[in-house]
Every structure is written in structure tokens, then in C-alpha cells.
Amino acid sequence: MSCCRRIDNDTANCLSSTLCCAVILFIFSLVIFAIVINSPKELNFTIADASLTRFNFVTANTNTNNTLFYSMALNITIRNPNKKGGLYYDRFQVIANYRKKTFAVVTSAVTPFYQGPKNTTVLHFVLEGQQAVQLEKGDIEWYGSVTSSGIYSIDVSLALQLRNVKFRNTKSHLEPPQIYCDKLKVPLHSNNVTYFKAIECNNVYIFTSRYDHEQSI
Ligand SMILES: *[C@@H]1O[C@H](CO)[C@@H](O)[C@H](O)[C@H]1NC(C)=O
Ligand SMILES: *[C@@H]1O[C@H](CO)[C@@H](O)[C@H](O)[C@H]1NC(C)=O
Ligand SMILES: *[C@@H]1O[C@H](CO)[C@@H](O)[C@H](O)[C@H]1NC(C)=O
Ligand SMILES: *[C@@H]1O[C@H](CO)[C@@H](O)[C@H](O)[C@H]1NC(C)=O
């Protein structure tokens, strides 16, 4: 209508300019559609399952250090929702923190591996060992207060090194920032608690970081 008003009384002109408007709108929506269709979707990282068979602190009287004996199993699900595009994982590292203190770092033995379009891969990790952890008095009290529940809040982060991250013809970051899977409520098996609520990880910028990067240039 706004197109028509600008052209005085000439019906033919009006018709052609309306048509022109329609065509421009159509092309515009096609472009938007193409951009949406061609945009890569981000990978999906989920801690699907986690359990502890051991998680106890041994406090030495002589110093402030505590030794944490731990054994934690994790199943991490990675989903590539894209119809096109894939990547190689050259290194897959799992870092576990309790009360903001790192107690375990494990690098996957199965890497490098390729993840193609529409693929879901499940990785299994076992973090086991002992680690001197410097805990504050408050942390120890906290640990004591949650022991009876048999559920421990553990933060996990993932450090990846990637290769050939390709979506159609474009490439993305090969060393994305750490991925966070926070506040896992991990049950200790000996307490008969087996329930674990799956947690989706955040801060994932593998297929999408490229755009953020380009925009910031
Ligand atoms: C992980 O997956 C394996 C195989 O499906 C399963 O046996 C195990 O119970 C799962 N959970 C953990 C925490 O390992
Ligand atoms: C306490 O732990 C830290 C870090 O593991 C270590 O450097 C330090 O020597 C330990 N102190 C004692 C008294 O064991
Ligand atoms: C996903 O990729 C992995 C690694 O290449 C492969 O072992 C697995 O079979 C694939 N899964 C599906 C559902 O295609
Ligand atoms: C775990 O369950 C078994 C059998 O259901 C029971 O005998 C045992 O006392 C339970 N242990 C704890 C720590 O609740």
C-alpha cells in the first residue's frame, strides 16, 4: 500500500510497484531462510550418568592438607545435531572439582575420534585416585554435613582439542574454551543412592564461536 501511494493514480505503475515490493519481500525472506538453514547448530554435551564408589577425605592432624580418595564414573553424551558437518576430537580432558578445588584431571584414552553429522557418541570415564586437597575449615564442615545424604556436588569441566571442525566449507575454533558441567549431584553407591539427574553442559562454542568471533572483529 505504501508503494501505491507514492505513485499518482497510475494503476499500471501501482500494480508493478506492488509486485516489486512483493518480490523484494520474497527474496528477503529467502535470504533469511537460507541463513537460518545454513547456520550450524551447536554440539550438545550432557553428563548422562555419574556415580561415586569412593569419596572420602582423610585428614592429617599435622598439617592443613587433606587427602581425598575418590573414584567416580561418568558417562558423557555428545550429540552433533547437524545434518552436515563433523569434527575430530584430538584430546578430550575431564577436570573434576569439589568446592572449587581440582581433584582429578583425566585425559581420554579413546581419542582421537571423529564425530560426523547426526551422531551421538557416549564416552565413559573413570576418575580414580587420591589427591591432596587444601580445604578450608568451612569446606570440611560442609563435607561432613552432606556425608549423610550420600550425594556430593561436583563440578566437571571439559577441555577439548579439535581438528577439522567443518560445517560445510567453513571452519571453526580448534581449541574452544572450557565447557562447564556444573553442580552434578553425584550419588555415592555404598549409600544405596543410585539416582542421578542428567546435566547439560554450558559454554559450548564449537560450531557457533566462529560467528561470535567474526562479529567481534
Ligand atoms: C554408563 O554407561 C554404561 C554402559 O551403558 C553403564 O554400564 C553404566 O552404568 C553407566 N553409568 C556410569 C556412571 O558409568
Ligand atoms: C600440602 O599440599 C600442597 C599441594 O599439594 C603441597 O605443596 C604441600 O607441600 C603440602 N603440605 C604439607 C605440609 O604436606
Ligand atoms: C558415532 O560416531 C562414532 C565414532 O565415529 C561411531 O563409533 C558410532 O557408531 C557413531 N554412532 C552413530 C549412532 O552413528
Ligand atoms: C543398602 O541396601 C541393602 C539392601 O537393600 C541394605 O541391606 C543396606 O543396609 C543398605 N545400605 C545402606 C548404607 O543404606
Image (cartoon, rainbow, N blue to C red):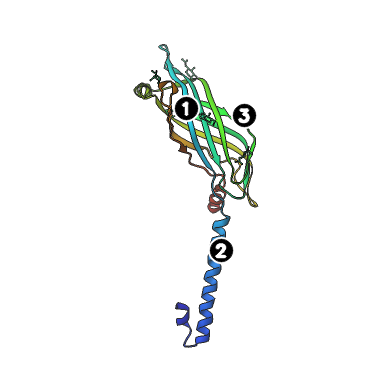
Residue 64 placement: quadrant: top left
Which type of secondary structure does the marked residue at label 1 adopt? Answer: strand
Which type of secondary structure does the marked residue at label 2 adopt? Answer: helix
Q: Spatial distance from mark 3 to mark 2, Cα to Cα?
A: 44 Å
Amino acid carrying mark 1 in the image: Ser
Which type of secondary structure does the marked residue at label 3 adopt? Answer: loop
**Up-down: is 178 above or below 107?**
below
**Label drawn at residue 31:** 2
Circle 3/circle 2 CB separation < 8 Å: no
Residue 174 placement: quadrant: top right
Circle 1/circle 2 CB separation < 8 Å: no
Amino acid carrying mark 3 in the image: Ala
**Label drawn at residue 97:** none
Q: Which residue is mark 1?
A: 51
Between circles 1 and 3, the one closer to the viewer is 1
Name which of mark 1 and mark 2 comes first in the sequence: 2
Amino acid carrying mark 2 in the image: Val
Give the image location of residue 11, x and y in percent.
50, 86
Q: Residue 87 vs residue 24: left or right?
A: right
**Label drawn at residue 109:** 3
Give the image location of residue 28, x and y in percent.
54, 67
Is the CB–ligand 1 distance for label 1 below 8 Å? yes
Name the one closer to the observer, 75 or 154: 75
